[in-house]
């Protein structure tokens, strides 16, 4: 016999057991959708609302085209994961950028480097 994996619902404290981690997660997910539907819907709504508040790469690029101040405002709200994604994209298109946009990008990049050291 294999190992028995155990889990507990954080909402109603119901216990679950399964022979594999994936089976346990499946049981718990089915339970949440069946017994705690409103809670699941609320979590999804909150996640969507939170993601709309976060700036995207496209928002930052649009700000780079406008003014350096606007680009810095958006930079302040970026998470590290978003910064890494943005840096990969902008490093790839540096040769195609207009000079003013490139200067702003280099300034923001230098600011980030100085800030993280």
Image (cartoon, helix red, strand yellow):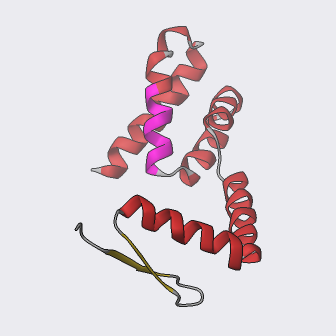
Q: Is residue 100 shown left or right of residue 24?
A: right
Residue 83 among magenta residues: yes
- Which residue is rendered at x = 72% and y = 57% of the image? 48
Residue 25 among magenta residues: no
In the rendered image, the quadrant that contains the N terminus is bottom left
The percent position of residue 20, horizontal first and vertical second, equals 35, 62
Would you place residue 14 above or below residue 95 in this image? Answer: below
**Can you tell which quarter of the image residue 59 is in?**
top right
Would you place residue 59 above or below residue 26 in this image? Answer: above
What secondary structure is the stretch in magenta mostly built from?
A: helix
Q: Is residue 46 shown left or right of residue 98?
A: right
Front position in the image: 59 or 81: 81
Front position in the image: 79 or 33: 33
Q: Which residues fall within the magenta stretch?
A: 80-88
- Which residue is rendered at x = 57% and y = 14% of the image? 97
- Which residue is rendered at x = 65% and y = 52% of the image? 54
């Amino acid at each position: 016999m294999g190992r028995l994996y155990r889990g507990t619902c954080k909402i109603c404290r119901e216990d679950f057991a399964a022979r594999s981690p994936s089976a346990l997660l499946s049981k718990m997910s089915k339970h949440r959708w069946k017994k705690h539907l409103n809670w699941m819907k609320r979590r999804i709504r909150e996640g969507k609302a939170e993601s709309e508040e976060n700036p995207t790469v496209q928002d930052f690029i649009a700000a780079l085209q406008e003014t350096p101040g606007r680009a810095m405002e958006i930079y302040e709200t970026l998470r590290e994961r978003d910064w890494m994604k943005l840096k990969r994209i902008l490093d790839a298109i540096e040769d195609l950028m207009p000079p003013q946009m490139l200067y702003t990008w280099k300034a923001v990049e230098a600011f980030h480097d100085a800030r993280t050291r």
